[in-house]
Amino acid sequence: MRIVGAEEVVTVTEQLENDYDVVVAGGGAAGLNGALMLARSRRTVVVIDAGEPRNAPAAGVHGLLGRDGMPPAELLETGRAEVRRYGGQVVSGEITAATRDGDGFAVTLADGRTVRARRLLVTTGLTDELPDIPGLRERWGRDVVHCPYCHGWEVRDRAIAVLSRGPISVHQVQLFRQLSDDVVYFTHDQPDPTPEAAERLAARGVRVVPGKVTGIEITDDRISGIQLADGTVVAREVVAVGTHMVARSGFLEGLGLAAVEHPGGFGRYIPSDATGRTEVPGVWAAGNVTDLSAQVGPAAAAGATAGAHINADLVEEEFDTAVAARRDGFTAAEEAELAESVNGSRGHGL
């Protein structure tokens, strides 16, 4: 298919080439922004997108300057068009394996297709694991939320329940209390708050309700209450709950790259440095797969950073290869002359 604009004709195809400079695993904000940077650097790049964005249930993207409130699907479609405008590809598919192939990587898709890449950018995001409470998953992204910065404004001034997942949930209560005067903290299957934490919650009018939560009461397709094991129903309109976040990274096992427990106890992630570089040479990571708490803006920025560093890494490799090839073509006399020229320049401080 061809997309025709005022000044451009962009070809959209699901056909994969055999080789790319970079394969980007994942087509969210991080992956698309990484691919955009690479395509603008004239790299051959393909984004392989499984089509399962974490924020799909949300009505809009929030906290992203210039795009606040934009539906997630619209943001991604805009990003795909921008990548394609510079010659990058975006292809539907699920990566099931990545292995070493000489000095690069072989990437295998669920449908049996394979491609080769010199570098790999992993932006596959994470899976949110929710408590096993009936009704919770069905309301996820609507009136069951987790992040006050992603959804807080939309639930302001409503009756909010915060469901404990451990000590970190006290911090979550404090953040949601900024958004509503009516916040109740349910301990569920976790210990009661420490005396100090309980005092702080009481000082801000947050009620603590002990007892196991067994269900979510729904009325007219809206949350109306929290059900407890003793039969009590506490009237609520919104549930805020922290999730156990697990990086989608099983396909990296063939490279010896596995998700590890986050030191903050939030879940499992792929460690990387500030540029996105992982412990496996040639593999970078960006977005929620390596930063569990990243919103869309930071995820996109991390993708751009990783894309730039991947390009720089490839540039260095190409210059090294060119120098080696040039030297291979020299005679012994030319090698000596080159060495003398270089040493002489150094001696004159050049």
Image (spheres, rainbow, N blue to C red):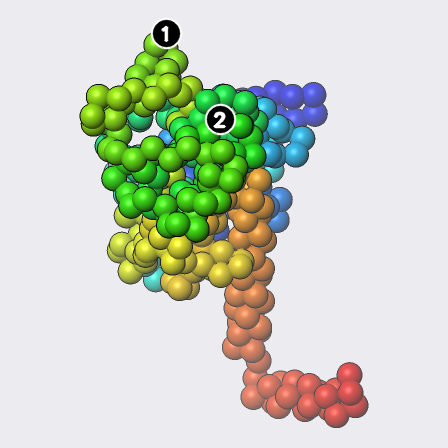
Q: Nearer the viewer, mark 2 or mark 1?
A: 2
Q: Quadrant of residue 278?
A: bottom left
Q: Residue at x 61, y 28 (%)?
A: 68
Q: Along the polypeptide, which appears first: circle 2 or circle 1?
A: 2
Mark number for residue 83?
Answer: none
150 and 163: which is toward the camera: 163
Disc 2 to disc 1, how far (Cα)? Answer: 22 Å
Name the image quarter holding the C terminus: bottom right
Q: How many marks?
A: 2
Dot 1 lies on which element? loop
Residue identified by numbered label 2: 182
Left or right for 167, reference 159: left
Task: Determine the residue located farthest toward the left in the rendered image.
Answer: 230
Which amino acid, mark 2? Asp
Q: Quadrant of residue 213?
A: top left
Q: Residue at x 72, y 88 (%)?
A: 346
Left or right for 25, reference 30: left
Q: Quadrant of residue 229?
A: top left
Residue 315 at x, y percent in the picture: 58, 61
Mark number for residue 220?
Answer: 1
Left or right for 174, reference 100: right
Residue 226 at x, y percent in the picture: 32, 23
Left or right for 191, reference 119: left
